Amino acid sequence: MEIRLGSFFLAAALLSGCSWFHRGERPQNQVVAEDTGADPSVIEPQVTRRAVKTPKIKAKDFEIGAYFGALSIQDFGVNPVYGARLAYHISEDVFFEALLGTSKAGTTSLEDEFPDITVISDAGRRFTYYDLDLGYNVLPGEVFIGRGRAFNSQLYVTVGMGDVKFAETDQFALNFGVGERLLITDWLALHLDVRDHIFETSLTGRTKNTDNIEATLGLTTFF
Amino acid sequence: MRRLLACVLLLTALCVDFAVGAEHRLELVVTAPYLEMHSGPGRGYPVIYVIGRDERVTVLYSRTDWYKVRAPEGQEGWARRTDLASTLLPSGAAAPIPPYPDFASHRWEVGAGYGVYYRENLVTSYADFGLTDSIDVEAVLQQALGTLDNRVVATIGLRHTFIPEWKWISPTAGLGTGYQHIADKEPPAPRQSDNQLAYVSLGVRGFITRRFMWRADWRHYVVFNNLNVYEDLEEWKFGLAVFF
């Protein structure tokens, strides 16, 4: 009886030991290889292919910036002007440009002479404009400063139209401009512009076309 | 206006940050005998460096038809689009230099122009999306500036290009609806300053070069009002546009 009981426990211990050993030693892929009936000596590579993503080339055809300068409002003196510029370069020669600027008119010589006379109200002295222009880089080149520094530059002309709000009324305006774009780096540019806003007005008595010339200095960045 | 300027300056600063921050760049292998690098993005700028065959060039960004590139030794310059298109990726595949969009099947268009609307000077801008090669959705925002009043007109409509394959000049026709706001300049004031309107249009379009095109349009508007007499207006305009 004792022998029988001893051999039973021995058999149980051996079985459980074998099963433990079996569980610990057999790797998972070996089981798969046996299950599929494949040659166990060939190891299936489990390498996931890395997706190669080609980087995109960023286009920097837009130019945005701000400018500051002086605007000569015909009959109303020379006044500070500031504005914002957005441009899109279509080719190395041609670009579209949108400008938004504002200034405040001074007094006419009549108002200076006779302080009681007011040609336009105080609120009406605000001069605000937008322009939609087409520009052409006529003289691309380089500017040399000292012996070792060269900056790319473009002399351009612009022509366009827009709206001028002056004396609290909107007027259609034509613009003609010439400017110099000096590239401090390839993405930062300094602008020197002279622009004429031509529009019709009858503020000073008779209806006439007025030339309102502005000279500005601006800074833009390409993006 | 000051807020707008502040926004522009902030955006400028962000653009500067983007310009400095980007790192992951495209590398291409030169297959021609050499690749020329110019000092600026234009045909007149002098060649300052050349990269030899089988050497790698890093592409930084593009401006119009020119690509800012960096040579293996670190020199930077501008390469022409056509020259860069002949290079290969390190894997041997063709360089991902996008071709110009096909004019006949382009999808997006943005443009501006001049016109006359009811005897008033018209400043017009538009955006256009091609549903198919011949049918577009066109959204227009324009300002008419006259001696008696100023008007803001916004419209949306469909336009059909009869033969989109005709490159230099191709007829179009369209119809749509919109809204008009009249700001009075001289008395008498309009009895109704906000109107809905509908239009039919005939026009032509044509290719100029690369991504550049022109359009000319004539429109007949019917302005709806509650005065029992519908107003008929005519408009013609000419514009230049960029297509993508």
Image: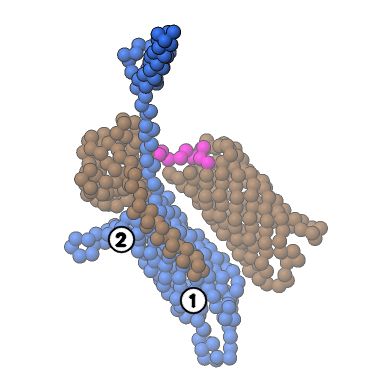
Mark 2 lies on a secondary structure that is loop
Q: How many angstroms separate mark 2 from mark 1 (CA)? A: 31 Å
Q: Nearer the viewer, residue A134 or B47?
A: B47
Task: Tell me where residue B146 appears, x and y as whole percent.
Answer: 62, 66
Task: Tell me where residue A161 appears, x and y as whole percent.
Answer: 51, 62
Of the two numbered discs 2 and 1 on the same chain, state the one appearing first in sequence: 1
In the rendered structure, the answer to whether residue B28 lies left or right of residue B153 reads left
In the rendered structure, the answer to whether residue B18 lies left or right of residue B71 reads right
Q: State the residue position of label 2.
A: A184
Q: State the residue position of label 1.
A: A73
| Residue B161 in magenta stretch | no
Task: Tell me where residue A45 appears, x and y as whole percent.
Answer: 34, 22
* Residues shaded magenta: B98-107
Mark 1 lies on a secondary structure that is loop
Displayed quadrant of residue B132:
top right
Residue A155 shows up from this direction: no
Query: Residue flagged by tag 1: what amino acid is it?
Result: Ile
Residue name at image x 59 percent, y 56 percent: B141
Residue name at image x 42 percent, y 74 percent: A70
Q: Nearer the viewer, residue A94 or A11?
A: A11
Which chain is tinted brown? B
